[in-house]
Amino acid sequence: MLNYITHLHSGSQTWVTFVHGAGGSSSIWYKQVREFKKHFNVLLLDLRGHGKSKLSLGDALDEKYDFDKITHDIVEVIDFLEIEKSHFVGISLGTVLIRNLAEKFPDRVASMVMGGAIMRLDLRFRMLMAFGSLFRSLVPYIWLYRLFTFAIMPDSNHKESRLLFVREAKKLYQKEFDRWYRLGSQINPLLRFFRSVDLKIPTLYVMGGEDYLFLPSVKKMVQKSKTSSLLLVEHCGHVVNVEQPKLFNDMVIGYLSQEN
């Protein structure tokens, strides 16, 4: 089972589950925990192979991951904790996992908050993925990871986010990085399907105005959805919860409180 941390609220039955992105860990939510646990029960997860989620022998021998398998890891934890329904807050690739969970288990999802959401891979990102596929067996994985973080978070005010994700990614093993990297080959069909189906689950997209790779597709998606809204954070990049934590916390807590 995944490593997890809970913060229980004596006066609330509402759960908020945080899901980080590839290469990160539950520690990326360190600017959220103090405020959110004042209002809700909080669940923080380390995805398989990340943070303190050590792989079992069977998982270590598993050469291929898919989004359903990783999604079921999350469901296993909420089942174990007997959480019938939760709000889910994700960042980057974590938003893809939350959207997949909502597709498979809609009754378990009260609402979704999608920070730095990935809803389409543009040509630049697909070219970067292809470049990485050519060289990932030749260079240390952390070099490629640094390249990706710089492409996604290029501006000087994104530096804190870049350093945080690189620091956490250094805890991965090369084989684990390769397994997650290969998920990239599965993501486009999945995102195409997500864009074609409008779930009837309240969704708040929280996007930085400088999230150059992913913001345009999210804007288009929100325009077509009756249950989605967009919070645009100016002068902010991909990792909105780190770069603008007070605004993120205030707006998301307000949103979740309304959805209870």
Image: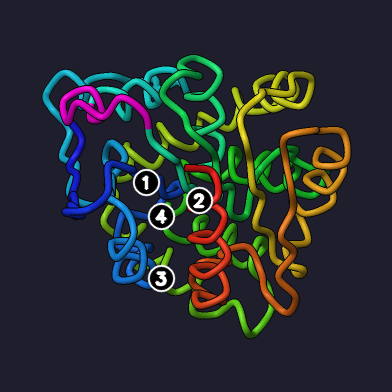
Query: CA separation, marks 4 and 2?
Result: 41 Å
The residue that disc 3 covers is 164
Secondary structure, mark 3, is helix
Viewer-nearest residue: 176 or 44: 44
Question: Dots 1 and 2: beta carbons under 8 Å?
Answer: yes
For the point 40% across and 45% down, which residue is it? 19
Lateral position of residue 155 relative to residue 253, left or right: right
Q: Residues within 10 Å of mark 4 (few under 14, many from 20)?
A: few
* The disc label shown at residue 113, or none: none
Residue at (41%, 23%) from the top-left corner?
108
Residue nearest the viewer, comparing 2 with 187: 2
Local crowd size for mark 3, using a 10 Å CA cut-off: few (<14), some (14–19), many (≥20): some
**Dot 1 corresponds to which residue?**
16
In the structure shown, which secondary structural element does the residue marked by tag 2 occupy? helix
Distance between mark 1 and mark 2 Cα atoms? 9 Å
215 horizontally vs 75: left or right:
right
What amino acid is labelled 2 in the image? Answer: Leu
Gap in angstroms between the C-alphas marked 4 and 1: 36 Å
Disc nearer the start of the sequence (1/2): 1
Local crowd size for mark 2, using a 10 Å CA cut-off: few (<14), some (14–19), many (≥20) = many
Task: Give SS at disc 4.
Answer: loop
Contact between labelled residues 3 and 2, with CB atoms less than 8 Å apart: no
**Mark 4 or mark 2, which is nearer to you?**
2
**Disc on the earlier residue, 2 or 3:** 3
As shown in the figure, which amino acid type bears the numbered disc 1? Val
Q: Residues in magenta?
A: 77-85
